[in-house]
Image: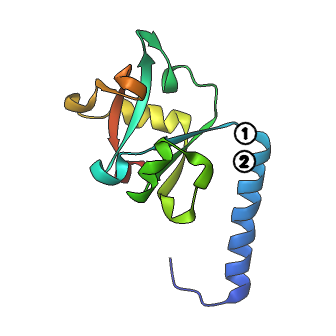
Amino acid sequence: MDYNSDFKYDLALGQLGEGWLGELLSSKTIEVKFDFGCHRTGNFFIEYESRGKPSGLATSQADYYFLIASSEKGERLKKDVSDLQQDDILHAILIHKDRLKSLCRQVPKNRLRINGGDNNTSVGVLIKAVELI
């Protein structure tokens, strides 16, 4: 795409994006997941089983997943979310559930069955954050 410094062009693109996001937020369901280890590992943990039963991505009714990686400072949120600050968030990714499922099915075998979640009672896959964009 060629560079365009025309404000009207940029405004039209911005408004197109705003319209898409507004429609998405008003008519779709979004599951929000915090990952407190992603800033250390570069991976998101995507749960699909808990306590021997399907859960997480395997049972979600959401249209989209909103994956949030906390910063190193944000790890304290595991204990107390009442003081959420802007710099507690490292990055966030909005991804359609079907695309996330497809990507999870493609991960290498050494990332297929990883214990995690609260008290390590869940099973999931590790997927690199960079693979989600």
Q: Are marks 1 and 2 in contact (CB under 8 Å)?
A: yes
Residue 6 in the image: state x and y as whole percent. Answer: 66, 90
Return the mark for residue 91.
none
Left or right of 43 on screen, residue 49: right
Measured from the top left, where is residue 18 in percent x and y?
A: 73, 63
Residue at 38% x, 36% y is 45
Q: Amino acid at mark 2?
A: Leu
Left or right for 79, reference 10: left
Q: Position of residue 11 (x, y in %)?
A: 73, 79
Residue 114 appears in which quarter of the rendering?
top left
Q: Nearer the viewer, residue 84 or 36?
A: 84
Residue 85 pos. (x, y %): 57, 61
Q: Is residue 1 above or below residue 33?
A: below
Residue furthest left in the image? 110
Q: Nearer the viewer, residue 71 or 102?
A: 71
Q: Is residue 28 left or right of residue 104?
A: right
Crowd class of label 1 (few under 14; some 14 to 19; many from 20; radius 10 Å):
few
In the depicted structure, whether residue 32 falls above or below residue 5: above
How many neighbours does mark 2 have within 10 angstroms: few (below 14), some (14-19), or many (20 or more)?
some
Dot 1 corresponds to which residue?
28
> Judging from the image, what secondary structure is the residue with disc 2 in?
helix
> What kind of element bears circle 1?
loop
- Give the residue pinned by disc 2: 24
Task: Name the residue furthest bottom.
Answer: 5
Which residue type does callout 1 highlight?
Lys
What's the distance in space between the residues labelled 1 and 2, CA to CA? Answer: 5 Å
* Closer to the camera in the image, 49 or 25: 49
Residue pictured at 36% horizontal, 48% vertical: 38
